[in-house]
Amino acid sequence: MRAKSDPILKVENLTMRFGGLVAVNDLSFVAGRGDITALIGPNGAGKTTVFNCITGFYKPTTGRMALRHGNIDIEAHVETLTDTPRDSLKGEGGSLFLLERMPDFEVSARAKVARTFQNIRLFSGMTVLENLMVAQHNPLMVASNWTLGGLIGLPGFKKRENEAIETAKYWLEKTKLIDRADDPAGDLPYGDQRRLEIARALCTDPVLLCLDEPAAGLNPKESAELNALLRSVCKDHGTSVLLIEHDMSVVMEISDHVVVLDYGTKISDGTPDEVKSDPRVIAAYLGAEDEAEVEKIEAEVGL
Amino acid sequence: MMDAVEKPVVNWGILFKDSVIAAIIAFGLFALMLGLKTDQALNNQMVLVGRPGLLAAVVGLVFVARLMTGYWQASRAGRIAPAKKTSSSAMMLKIEKFGLPVAVGFLVAYPIFVLATAGPQGAIKWIDNFGIQILIYIMLGWGLNIVVGLAGLLDLGYVAFYAVGAYSYALLASSEPIKEFMAQLIGEGFWQVWAFWICLPVAGILAAFWGVLLGFPVLRLRGDYLAIVTLAFGEIIRLVLINWVDFSNGYAGISSIPRPSFFGTPFTAGEDGFAAKFGLEFSPIYRTIFLFYVILALALVTAAVSMRLRRLPVGRAWEALREDEIACRSLGINTVNTKLTAFAIGAMFGGFAGAFFAARQGFISPESFVFLESAQILAIVVLGGMGSLLGVVIASILLVGGVEVLRELDFLKLYFGDGFDPAQYRMLIFGICMVLMMLWKPRGLISAREPTVFLKEKKVVSSDLVKEGHG
């Protein structure tokens, strides 16, 4: 767990209100670089809201979300950046981004945070390969000189497009979808669609990958394959992963760090083992009222 | 087993009962409407005249029609639909691939062929009414296809950009200050001859500018709301053109718009004219033929650009936007810019077509840019199959050419009397055709989507998977 020594994302005092409803209440946590950080909690705990705030789909009511590229010191620079009206800062060794100040598409394009959705959002009428090409829109747009160069057929664009196809092929092989590259995305079975969405997010070359329930609806074999894929993404590519998941076998097996939410408030934060034995977590999941009752329940289930 | 599936099982008893019920309902509906007619007797009294023959004919027709549709449905139910569907859409794409060069070749040869068969007098009608008229709509259809077919943004006010292009050309080309300025700068007569070629790109740029202007306020709107605002935009442009008389001359329109020249050589009867220069006898047909090739070239440029744009990142982003806007934003695509480019490029081609229209007519007024035009262009795109270039061609020929064909059906007067004008029934026929299309092929004539990039094999995407867009 590298949340302390090598953080990539630092969320501070994040609050999101929808009218009178407080979906996320003063949440602070740190995700470490190269870690798989899991965000868990009962239904309606505000996990997806946190994701939507991080990826810019919601503007948080209050709070600060600092993301860094490279080795810039978050603590040293974040206050300076906050005092300016800007959303990012380039310093020695890297850049710092304040995600709450950026619109959704820039969070992906500039801050390099990619995400998937709880209900899969593929371009179903486009082929698998096309889905991955759309994900590489921004570099391809530059290579095509914002369409003009591509329109008159400059060779630079063709070369860059071939590179993009190679990138797509790489991720298709990784996700075992290479044989279906030319099929429409909407024709794939559910498990393949889940993997394709992850592959598509990875094609944007993210530093932080946010996965909203990637194992939902997968069978145990597919779920094990997903674990291996996520592990490899972290190890081989240095991409950090932030994950919402209900499947505890996935969470406990692959995450380095677990943050538990209940009613929008953080109730536990630590390694999987620490969280597993946290009485508040057990209470939240089992629905107990207070500590005494938790102990009773623990005794009953033999913990 | 296979035989049992293929052979339709028709239950004639049920079918007969069904048809009898349909006939009874028809009788109930029509007994008063058709069976009785009020008429004036000699003493100016109203009398009821029974028409049992007509009533019987209609009821009989309903009975037979119900019997036939029932049989058709029953025989269709036994077939396996999906497999056939993909193969037919794949075939359509093949037609598109080979059909397009054939169609272009045919169009290039068309004026010469018509001239050879119909002679210079008869050919004008065929080249102008059929050729140029249809090509204008093909071009407009291809332009709107970018907005509606690719980006999935329902635009009911496309005619506004057509009007902007037409008025840009008409106002610039007939403007006295510009004419004088050009006369001082380059020489007398220059503007008269070259105005079209200089104003054509200007008209396109102005239309694109208005496309962006429309795009900005409607970016947040989706579906029905977007359609209503674009519809209003089209009407605003038209009403401004009607009411701002100082600017556009209102209802009276703008006349004596300079006609396009053959790259500097005007189509006039004089010494410097096209005919004299090339040693031909003067005839208006040369201008018509030239205009045909100009619009053909403009339309082909539109097709080539939109085909190429589809394979560029911006085109893929348009299609992705049609599929899922939120996913687009999660992938770092600036949806605002993407929508605006779709509006601007679509509008630009509308502007080109408008400038050509003004040059061809020599006279324009707001009457040419009513909502019905927008509806017709949209109908062409929807009927053709959203995103398909060949589909737009077929739909334009059917819709625009169809109306022209109706005007040619003079022989029908023999049967229906002298007052019968089949062109009066065009909206009725148009409506029936649209209803039938929606039943038979709701996603248009060519509904399969061709992928823009592939690894091993190009597989067409069936229309069931392709979304229509929501904004």
Image (tube, rainbow, N blue to C red):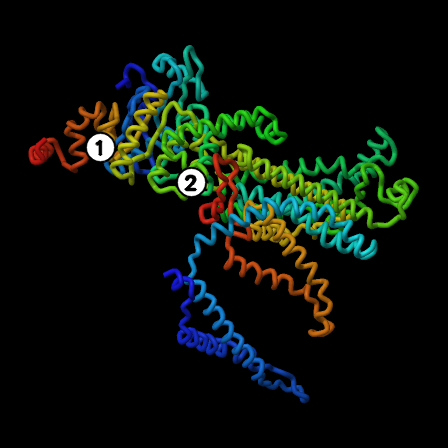
Kindly identify the residue that appears in the image at 60 percent across and 51 percent down.
B380
Determine which residue is flagged by label 2: A185
Kindly identify the residue that appears in the image at 68 percent across and 66 percent down.
B422
Residue B147 shown left or right of residue B365 in the figure: left
Kindly identify the residue that appears in the image at 72 percent across and 42 percent down.
B355
Q: Count of labels shown?
A: 2
In the rendered view, would you say B224 is above or below A9? below
How packed mark 1 is, by other alpha carbons closer than 10 Å (few <14, some 14-19, many 20 or more), is few
Kindly identify the residue that appears in the image at 23 percent across and 28 percent down.
A253
**Of A120 and A66, which appears nearest the observer?**
A120
Q: Which comes sooner in the sequence, label 2 or label 1?
A: 2
The image quarter containing residue B399 is: bottom right
Q: Label 2 to label 1, Cα distance in Å?
A: 28 Å
Determine which residue is flagged by label 1: A249
Amino acid type shown at disc 2: Ala
In the rendered view, would you say A21 is above or below B88? above
**Residue B74's x, y, as percent?**
43, 66
Quick check: can you spot residue B239?
no
**Residue A46's x, y, as percent?**
29, 34
**Of A142 and B276, which appears nearest the observer?**
B276
Quick check: can you spot residue B49?
yes
**Residue A243's x, y, as percent?**
30, 30
How packed mark 2 is, by other alpha carbons closer than 10 Å (few <14, some 14-19, many 20 or more), is many
